């Protein structure tokens, strides 16, 4: 009987120790996304510095980034089209929203890393053309 009581107390303690409120999970998801967004900003800055002499590329990169942000926002609106998403999708909406935002941002980082850290086998078009000598 003591073993059962001990196991019940132990399992309750562990569950309570790791339990989070929805608000805490939302904040955690937001903070996680912000870290990934900072990584995107860092990769973008590397590209801007490496390709600073390639004005045509930089202009195309900026246009691409503006369009990617529009795409990202449209993807999220498509996923959560409600005018009142918290009411429509519940208290988990914020956490799920930031999770999807983080996924899309990680995919963008992967796309841009080809320019930031070009490998010889990846060199195509403007990849690795730091001076704009086409």
Image (cartoon, rainbow, N blue to C red):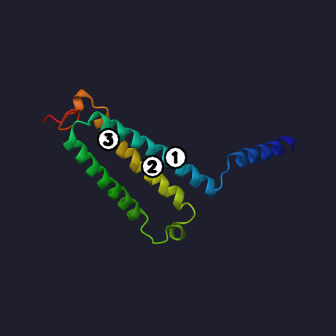
Compared with 101, 1 (above or below) is: above
In the image, 80 versus 65, the foreground residue is 65
| Relative side of 94 to 51, left or right | right
- The single residue placed furthest to the top in the displayed view is 120
Label 2 near label 3: C-beta < 8 Å? no
> Residue 87, image x and y in percent?
54, 70
Instruction: Mark 3: give few (<14), some (14-19) or many (20+) Cα within 10 Å.
Output: some
| Relative side of 72 to 3, left or right | left
Label 2 near label 1: C-beta < 8 Å? yes
Q: Which image quarter is the N terminus in?
A: top right
Is label 3 in a helix, a strand or a loop? helix
Compared with 46, 18 (above or below) is: below
Find disc 1 in the rendering and name its residue.
32
In the image, 54 versus 66, the foreground residue is 54
Find disc 3 in the rendering and name its residue.
112
Labels 3 and 2: the sequence-earlier one: 2
- Count of numbered badges drawn on the protein: 3
Which image quarter: residue 2? top right
Labels 1 and 2: the sequence-earlier one: 1
- Residue under the image location 40 percent in, 64 percent down: 77
**Which of label 3 and label 2 is nearer to you?**
3
Which image quarter: residue 91? bottom right
Q: CA distance from mark 1 to mark 2?
A: 8 Å
- Residue under the image location 40 percent in, 39 percent down: 42
Is label 1 in a helix, a strand or a loop? helix
- Residue under the image location 39 percent in, 50 percent down: 104
Instruction: Mark 2: give few (<14), some (14-19) or many (20+) Cα within 10 Å.
Output: many
Q: Which image quarter is the C terminus in?
A: top left
> Residue 52, image x and y in percent?
26, 37
Q: CA distance from mark 1 to mark 3?
A: 20 Å
Find disc 2 in the rendering and name its residue.
102
């Amino acid at each position: 009987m003591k073993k059962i009581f001990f196991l019940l107390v132990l399992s309750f303690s562990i569950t309570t120790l790791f339990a989070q409120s929805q608000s805490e999970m939302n904040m955690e998801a937001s903070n996680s996304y912000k870290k990934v967004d900072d990584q995107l900003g860092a990769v973008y800055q590397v590209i801007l510095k490496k390709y600073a002499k390639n004005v045509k590329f930089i202009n195309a990169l900026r246009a691409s980034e503006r369009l990617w942000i529009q795409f990202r926002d449209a993807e999220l609106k498509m996923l959560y089209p409600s005018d009142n998403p918290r009411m429509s999708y519940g208290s988990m909406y914020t956490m799920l929203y930031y999770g999807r935002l983080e996924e899309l941002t990680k995919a963008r980082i992967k796309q841009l890393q080809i320019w930031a850290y070009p490998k010889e086998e990846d060199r195509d078009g403007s990849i690795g053309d730091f001076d704009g000598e086409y």
